[in-house]
Amino acid sequence: MIKKELLIGFVVSIIFTALGFALSVLIFSVYKELTFATTLKTILEQDRLWALLALSSIPSLLAFHRFLNTNRIYRARGVLISTFLMAFIVYYLYLF
């Protein structure tokens, strides 16, 4: 039961991060008046993917806050696990 709750929190956090990623790229593309693909290509060429991933992890805080308020502690732990995994990925991309 605990593993299932952790997995649910992990998956919810990954979904929120993916939505945050898409929303961030969309906002940057509207701001720069470029297409979605062009904006993403520019970010990859400038080696700024780490910054975009760090920014896209912010919506996971909403899921974490909701799980804590509804006393779903293990789901909140799943969100934390996903956030720490994303932090390690961001640090790896930044340093190497």
Image: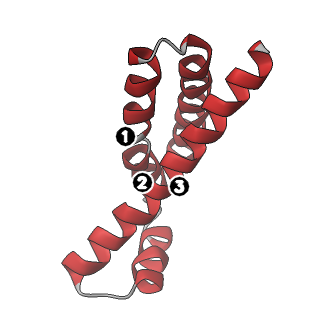
Residue 34 visible, this orientation: yes
**Amino acid type, label 3:** Ala
Residue 94 percent coordinates (x, y): 50, 44
Mark 3 closeness class: few <14, some 14–19, many ≥20 residues within 10 Å: some
Residue lying furthest front: 70
Q: Which residue is mark 2?
A: 20
Label 3, label 1: how many angstroms apart (C-alpha)?
A: 11 Å
> Along the horizontal axis of the image, is 10 left or right of 79?
right
Query: Disc 1 or 2, which lies upstream in sequence?
Result: 2
In depth, the one of 46 and 62 nearer the eye is 62
User: Which residue sits at x=48%, y=73%?
Assistant: 45
Residue 51 percent coordinates (x, y): 40, 50
Label 1, label 2: how many angstroms apart (C-alpha)?
A: 7 Å
Q: Which residue is mark 1?
A: 58
**Amino acid type, label 2:** Gly
**Given contact means CB atoms under 8 Å apart, are the residues at marks 2 and 3 in contact?**
yes
Residue 20 percent coordinates (x, y): 42, 54
SS under mark 1: loop
Label 2, label 3: how many angstroms apart (C-alpha)?
A: 5 Å
**Given contact means CB atoms under 8 Å apart, are the residues at marks 3 and 1 in contact?**
no
The image quadrant that residue 63 belongs to is top left
